[in-house]
Image (cartoon, grey):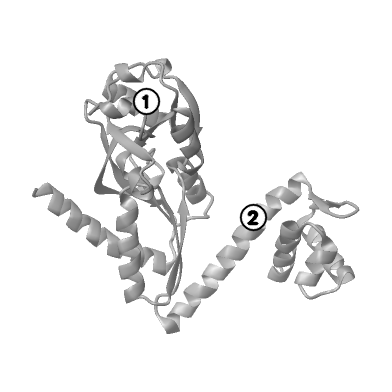
Amino acid sequence: MDTRLLHAFIVLTQIGNITHAAEVLHTSQPNLSRQLKELETEVGAQLFVRGKRSITLTDAGIIFEQRAQAMLDYFDQTKQDLRQQSTGLAGKIRIGCVESHISAYVAQWLAAFQKKHPNSTFSIYSADGNSIRTQIDQGNLDVGFLLEPVESAKYWTQHIPVTETWGLMMAKDAKLTQKSTITGNDLVGLPLLGARRSIVINQISSWLKIDPDTLNLCGERNLDNNILPLITQFGYYDISVDGMLDFYTDNQLTFVPFSPLSQSQHTLITRKNHQLPPTVQEFINEITVQINALTSQVDHQ
């Protein structure tokens, strides 16, 4: 398959209009239409339906759009890997990372790696554990940094001893800011927000010795940015980790830990039985040394 056809299809799906897509691709509208027809013939399915001013993807087109972008990304990565034969380690490291204390470590590791391997680049995807695992499963990310617990059976994992304390994120003027810790009884009746992963809520409920079904969970979130108004203006409380405060320095929020003390650490994951690009593998090798040193340091404290 000609990769130019894949690129033309992706451009069309992004723009939604064949005439405008042809202008972006510096070709004529009839030539682009012919190329797209060739593509449909080759894959054996109708990929889109023409409207008066726009195109609509068919079900087959939606599936093909996802695969076409993955194929183009893989082709680009392959070219970069081959260039490394003469230029040294190069290429992109695609990283998924939760927003927590681990973010500072990832930044440090990336900066050190790029200084050593200046032809490398990186892409950081900020999300919760669910989204990061999904992107890794689909081949869109190479490496994930997640909060434990992690459903890790299908991943290669490396434990990272960077600790997060669980508790409630709340507005500065919330009534519970007067407390030094939050118990299970304090949660009764509160409008709560929480992570999408049920394994996290179950773990916290176990720590606090409460039934998770008794929690007034009003909503779920992956990251905290879009729920800030709910916390600061409407009195919601977010079940979160203290590392989230690293990202909010405007003093709108405060954090109160749970009692008994409830803590998690982090895990590095990659897909099992999957050959990683050389640059990604070297990144993992180098930070594993740093993680092992950190583990040794924590063990001797």
Determine the secondary structure under disc 2.
Answer: helix
Along the horizontal axis of the image, is 283 left or right of 25?
left
Q: Please, what is the three-letter code of the amino acid marked with disc 1?
A: Asn
The Cα–Cα distance between marks 1 and 2, rounded to whole angstroms, is 35 Å
The residue identified by callout 2 is: 67
Q: Nearer the viewer, mark 1 or mark 2?
A: 1
Note whether 269 is above or below 122 in the view shown: above
Locate residue 278: give its quadrant: bottom left
Q: How far across and down, in percent of the image, does residue 175 sit?
A: 34, 25
The residue drawn where x is 31% and y is 36% is: 255
Note whether 262 is above or below 102 in the view shown: above
The residue identified by callout 1 is: 202
Note whether 288 is above or below 134 in the view shown: below
Q: Please, what is the three-letter code of the amino acid marked with disc 2?
A: Arg
The residue drawn where x is 87% and y is 69% is: 29
The residue drawn where x is 89% and y is 69% is: 30
Q: How far across and down, in percent of the image, does residue 143 sit?
A: 41, 55
Residue 46 appearing in the image: no
Of 267 and 19, the residue lying toward us: 19
Of 36 and 18, the residue lying toward us: 18
Along the horizontal axis of the image, is 154 left or right of 298?
right
Comes first in the chain, label 1 or label 2: 2
